[in-house]
Image (cartoon, rainbow, N blue to C red):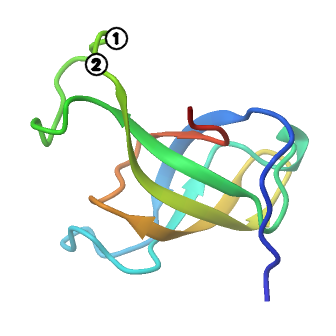
């Protein structure tokens, strides 16, 4: 059992790897790896959001257009945090999470 909780500080980072079959578009309880860990304030149970900048029309954005808003594509829960990297599971997602997607502990 993992007790979940919001973080006190704002933490941003990136998805660095996915642990699933690349042929599946959206996988329930997808395991991902992120580039933040205990030294950044994460712990088992930390809740974060995966965001992607865009208008929702382009499936593969070609440019990081700063005029477009961030779209929440999923919510993750950290279940193992090392010093600089953490393993998390996607508990909600609307599209497949990609390597390079941004993560954040706060959404406005």
Q: Secondary structure at mark 2?
A: loop
Task: Provide the residue designation for mark 1.
Answer: 66
Q: Determine the CA span between mark 2 and mark 1.
A: 5 Å
Task: Provide the residue designation for mark 2.
Answer: 68
Give x and y (percent) for residue 13: 61, 35
**Residue 25 position (above or below residue 102):** below
Q: Which quadrant would residue 97 be assigned to in this image?
A: bottom left
**Residue 100 position (above or below residue 85):** above
Q: Nearer the viewer, residue 85 or 45?
A: 45
Residue at x 52%, y 59% (from the top left corner): 75
Q: Nearer the viewer, residue 105 or 100?
A: 105
Task: Tell whether label 1 touches label 2 (CB within 8 Å).
Answer: yes
Give x and y (percent) for residue 28: 38, 80
Q: Quadrant of the N terminus?
A: bottom right
Q: Nearer the viewer, residue 40 or 1?
A: 1
Given the current orientation, which residue lies at the most extreme top position?
67
Instruction: Decide if residue 43 is on the left or right side of residue 80.
Output: right
Q: Which quadrant would residue 18 be assigned to in this image?
A: bottom left
Can residue 97 be spotted in the picture? yes
């Amino acid at each position: 059992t993992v007790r979940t909780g919001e973080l006190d500080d704002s933490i941003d980072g990136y998805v660095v790897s996915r642990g699933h079959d690349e042929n599946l578009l959206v996988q329930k309880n997808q395991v991902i790896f992120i580039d933040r860990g205990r030294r950044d304030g994460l712990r088992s149970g930390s809740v974060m959001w995966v965001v992607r900048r865009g208008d929702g029309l382009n499936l593969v954005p070609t440019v990081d257009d700063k005029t477009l808003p961030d779209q929440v594509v999923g919510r993750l829960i950290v279940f193992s945090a090392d010093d600089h990297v953490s393993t998390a599971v996607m508990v909600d997602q609307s599209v497949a999470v990609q390597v390079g997607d941004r993560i954040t502990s706060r959404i406005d």
